[in-house]
Image: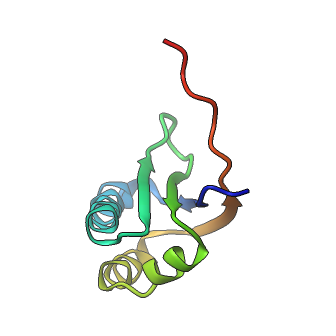
């Protein structure tokens, strides 16, 4: 049985747009966690190597919570503000099966 719905999104962002893109995506991530009951986690992963994609790791209660996320004003603002900043993006969807607890 799944314990959540995961999105792994990758954005190909040219170096000259990276800082601006990161500002928008951090804002979207913060609003998602703060304002959406169904958003359990939203991490922004900045690559260590130039030219690699920025990745987003998002966990939602279920697919419906993610679909609700796509209809929020903060997502619409992020999407509109970043369209011209990226060369491409990919989105993969997963069922979450929680990992084993860390050992002390």
Please give the count of numbered marks on the rendered protein: 0
Q: Residue at x 49, y 69 (%)?
A: 86
Q: Residue at x 44, y 78 (%)?
A: 69
Q: Position of residue 68 (x, y in %)?
A: 46, 83
Left or right: where 23 falls relative to 100: left
Q: Position of residue 72 (x, y in %)?
A: 36, 84
Left or right: where 58 falls relative to 81: right
Left or right: where 93 falls relative to 71: right
Residue 103's place in the image compared with 100, above or below, is above
Q: Residue at x 59, y 69 (%)?
A: 88
Q: Position of residue 1 (x, y in %)?
A: 73, 56
Residue most toward the front? 1
Q: Residue at x 57, y 69 (%)?
A: 62
Residue most toward the right? 1
Residue 46's place in the image compared with 100, above or below, is below
Q: Nearer the viewer, residue 10 or 60?
A: 60
């Amino acid at each position: 049985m799944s314990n959540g719905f995961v999105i792994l999104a990758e954005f190909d962002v040219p170096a000259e747009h990276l800082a601006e893109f990161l500002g928008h995506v951090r804002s979207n991530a913060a609003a998602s966690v703060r304002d959406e009951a169904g958003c359990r986690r939203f991490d922004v992963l900045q690559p260590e190597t130039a030219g690699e994609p920025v990745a987003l790791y998002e966990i939602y209660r279920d697919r419906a919570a993610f679909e609700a996320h796509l209809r929020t004003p903060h997502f619409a603002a992020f999407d509109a503000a970043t369209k011209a900043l990226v060369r491409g993006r990919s989105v993969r969807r997963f069922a979450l099966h929680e990992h084993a607890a860390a050992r002390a």
